[in-house]
Amino acid sequence: MTARDQLASLAAALQQLRSDALGIPAFSQLAQSQTALQAALPARYAEVLQQLLDRLESSALFSEESCSFSQKELLDSLQLWLDKAQTLLDKTSP
């Protein structure tokens, strides 16, 4: 799969996660396995993605009230990451 294909796959998985059709562990595993996408982006993108995934996995262990960050905000941050990655791929790829 190309980086663009993997980005599209990850975007679709995020939508499934938002609709509870996919669990957090499966989403996290999918995100971490997108090696072509991570290779096509600067290293800081992988770092930020890993931080978001770590927080998302941690948030799944607690109820919304006891967690210091909300899952909705994390999902919104993941969407922002996807949008920025798409913009970067659009600039660097023909």
Image (spheres, rainbow, N blue to C red):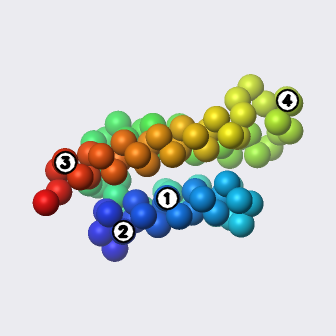
Asked if the residue under mark 2 is in contact with the one under mark 3, i.e. CB atoms within 8 Å, the reply is no
| Disc 2 secondary structure class | helix
Amino acid of disc 2: Asp
Alpha-carbon distance for marks 2 and 1?
Answer: 10 Å
Q: Which callout, 4 or 3, points to the residue nearer the camera?
A: 3
Quarter of the image with the C terminus is: bottom left
Q: Residues within 10 Å of mark 1 (few under 14, many from 20)?
A: some
Mark before the other along the chain sequence, 4 or 3: 4
Q: Which callout, 4 or 1, points to the residue nearer the camera?
A: 1
Mark before the other along the chain sequence, 4 or 1: 1
Q: Is residue 12 above or below residue 38?
A: below
Q: Which callout, 3 or 2, points to the residue nearer the camera?
A: 3
Asked if the residue under mark 1 is in contact with the one under mark 3, i.e. CB atoms within 8 Å, the reply is no
Residue ID for mark 1: 11
Question: Is residue 52 among the parts visible in the rendering?
Answer: no
Residue ID for mark 2: 5
Residue 91: mark in rendering: 3
Alpha-carbon distance for marks 2 and 4?
Answer: 36 Å
Q: Give residue 17's position: percent from left, percent from top.
A: 66, 58
As drawn, is 83 to the left or to the right of 62?
left
Q: Which callout, 2 or 4, points to the residue nearer the camera?
A: 2
- Residue 43, by quadrant, is top left
| Disc 4 secondary structure class | helix
| Disc 1 secondary structure class | helix
Residue ID for mark 4: 66
Q: Residues within 10 Å of mark 2 (few under 14, many from 20)?
A: few
